[in-house]
Amino acid sequence: MRRRQLAALGVGFGMPCVARAQDAWPSRPIRLVIPFAAGGPIDTVGRLIGERLRDRLGQPFIIENRTGAGGSIGLRGVVQSPPDGYTFVLTSSSLAILPAIYANLGFDPRTDLAPVSLVAEIATTIVVRADHRFASLQALVEEARAKPGTVTYGTSGIGSSNHLSGAMLAATARIDIVHVPYRGAAQAMNALYSRDIDLVFASTVETLSHAREGRARILAVTTARPIPALPDVPTATEAVPGYIAPNWFAIAAPKGLPAPILDRLSAELAALRTDPDFRSRFERLGAEPQMSAPGVLAARLAEDVPTWQRVAATAGIRPE
């Protein structure tokens, strides 16, 4: 009887301790895993978010770039981390693409991670050299139909969101264009200027500076509507009806993240959405800040995974 009373007291005292630990969050630095290389678009966004959240939460966000296997290595590490509020991942729409191309991923992003926030919508651009013969996406599509297998496009790698955006264009427009993978968008852009390829699929973060300097021409964005950073650039769906290739950034946590921590982080991210300077810096990158509730990211995953599964199956895309 005495032992049962002591056990009950232990539970009674332990629960407030857990609550106090959650109330005190964060009490030490927070790890933000980015499953892609430093210097890329998501790394740029991650450092901006980490800087602002450090100011709001009073603890530094330590950026950890864990690359490999299309982002799955970094994601797997987060899935296996304790859900204590000190490990998060900032990733891209690859979160919805990985289940489409890896048969044995080892985890399911839809069930093995806790969605925190859809951070931003970011446009994928279709880019050519400034002096390229393609003056429009329509011209590109017409040549690809007339000469199947002769138009080449570069991306940041097999199974990347940019690769699947190209595959989706080919399927929607019913054209045969040849994918040429590179180690990253910078290498693909170098190949473009070396005239090794005809065009590149890459995000605005990677292509806006090239267009502004006059070295490249953006034929279209793959969003449903024009973006503020490129108001005069048409959407790809104007030339290819029905072609919209979603691209986004999101934050997730290990499954089981305590609700008080999730609510606190969601509220701090939502506050950034209305910060004029933060919005301005996002928009200069061609990104539209979202900072949504967790349910929005969960719904987006549920919608996008089947879409990319169909694209990958049609194009026969499998990891190397």
Image (cartoon, rainbow, N blue to C red):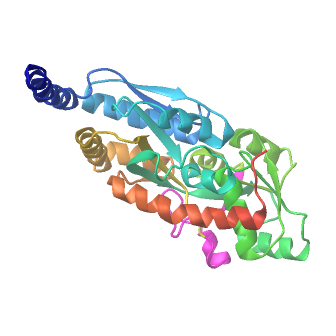
Establish if 164 lies above or below 169.
above
The magenta stretch spans residue 181: no
| 271 left or right of 316 in image | left
Looking at the image, residue 102 lies above or below residue 71 = below
Q: Nearer the viewer, residue 41 or 220?
A: 41
Position of residue 209 measured from the top left corner of the image (x, y, whole percent) = 61, 45
Main SS of residues in magenta: loop
Left or right of 128, for residue 81: left
Task: Decide: is 230 above or below 90.
Answer: below
Above or below residue 123? Residue 1 is above
Looking at the rendered structure, the number of numbered marks drawn on it comes to: 0
Residue at horizontal 49 percent and vertical 37 percent from the top = 79
The x, y position of residue 254, in whole percent, is 42, 38
Looking at the rendering, in which quadrant would you find the C terminus?
A: top right
Q: Is residue 244 left or right of residue 140?
A: left
- Residue at the front extreme, as displayed: 1
In the orientation shown, which residue stands out farthest toward the bottom? 241
Question: Percent from the top left, x then y, of residue 13?
Answer: 11, 25
Residue in view at x 57 percent, y 46 percent: 205
In which quadrant will I find the N terminus?
top left
Tell me the residue at 81%/59% (across/down): 132
Q: Find residue 19 and report its image quarter.
A: top left
Where residue 277 appears, as percent x and y from the top left, is 34, 43
- Left or right for 121, reference 271: right
Q: Residue 244 lies in what quarter of the image?
A: bottom right
* Residue 218 forms part of the magenta stretch: yes
Front residue of this view, candidates 71 and 183: 71
Residue 298 seen in the figure = yes
Residue numbers of the magenta segment: 216-243
Q: Residue at x 69, y 43 (%)?
A: 185
Of 291 and 84, nearer the camera is: 84
Do we see residue 217 in this rendering?
A: no
